[in-house]
Amino acid sequence: MKKILLIEDDLKICEVIEKYFSNKGTEIFSVHNGSEALEIAGSCLGNYELVLLDIMLPYADGFAICREIRKKSDIPVVFITARAREEDILYGYGTGCDDYIIKPFLLSALYAKCDALVRRSKKTDSILECGDIKLDTRRLVCSVNNNETELPKKEFEILKYLMEHQNCVIDRNTILDRVWGYDWFGNDRVVDNHIKKLRKALGSAGGQIKTLIGRGYKLTER
């Protein structure tokens, strides 16, 4: 890691993070309120490799900042926060963060997670393409013929899995396991309903999702 943006209003926490990361050869640039963070998110995220982001900040909270970052960049974002409620954690991931770390934390563990995320982000292509469909898996944006198309969460996850396995026949149970989870006990026909909605949302590209009767679904370029 070379340079990290730290968005945190607790100056003592900033100091200890800056010292530890600097000793590891990483440069930290800190801002201490939401308005400064939003300004950076809108203009100069390209200077950084990762964002460490508190949630409870003056002027704008971390959730809003994370959403703004995701409009502009696929840079890794890690929440560091005292908010430990399950709904906050789930909401944090819903805004597009890559990890959610609850205070207090071990500096060594924080550094290791950040290092792994930066290395992974350099290796992983966040853009999936198939025919007229393009999926940005970090910004959570779907485009058809370069026009953004809004997809609900389940439809997005189904499409992502199909795009990761282009030209492969995927049965309903596999889609259920990957999208709904292994503890799902509902009817597998729920997949058909969501595929129908997905095709409609994709418009002209909906026909790229093929139905193979008795076998499952396949995504093709045409």
Image: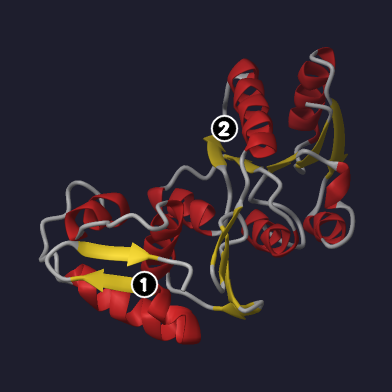
- Tell me, for residue 103, which label it has, or none: 2
Amino acid found under the numbered disc labelled 1? Ile
Q: What residue type is labelled 2?
A: Lys
Gap in angstroms between the C-alphas marked 1 and 2:
44 Å
Q: Is residue 219 left or right of residue 107?
A: left
Position of residue 96 measured from the top left corner of the image (x, y, whole percent): 57, 55
Task: Please tell me which residue is depicted at 39% across the width and 59% down the height of the picture.
Answer: 162
x and y, in percent, of residue 204 in the image: 48, 86
Q: Which mark is residue 209?
A: 1
Number of marks in the image? 2
Looking at the picture, tell me which residue is in the foreground, 197 or 78: 197
Residue located 47% across and 86% down the image: 203
Q: Is residue 55 above or below residue 29?
A: below
- Observer-nearest of 110 and 9: 110
Mark 1, Cα crowd under 10 Å, few <14 / some 14-19 / many 20+, is: many
| Label of residue 155 in the image | none
Q: Quadrant of residue 30?
A: top right
Q: Residue at x 82, y 13 (%)?
A: 23
For the residue carrying disc 2, how many other residues have a C-alpha within 10 Å: few (<14), some (14-19), or many (20+)? Answer: few
Q: Where is residue 72 in the image (x, y as percent from the top left)?
A: 75, 61
> Secondary structure beneath disc 2?
loop
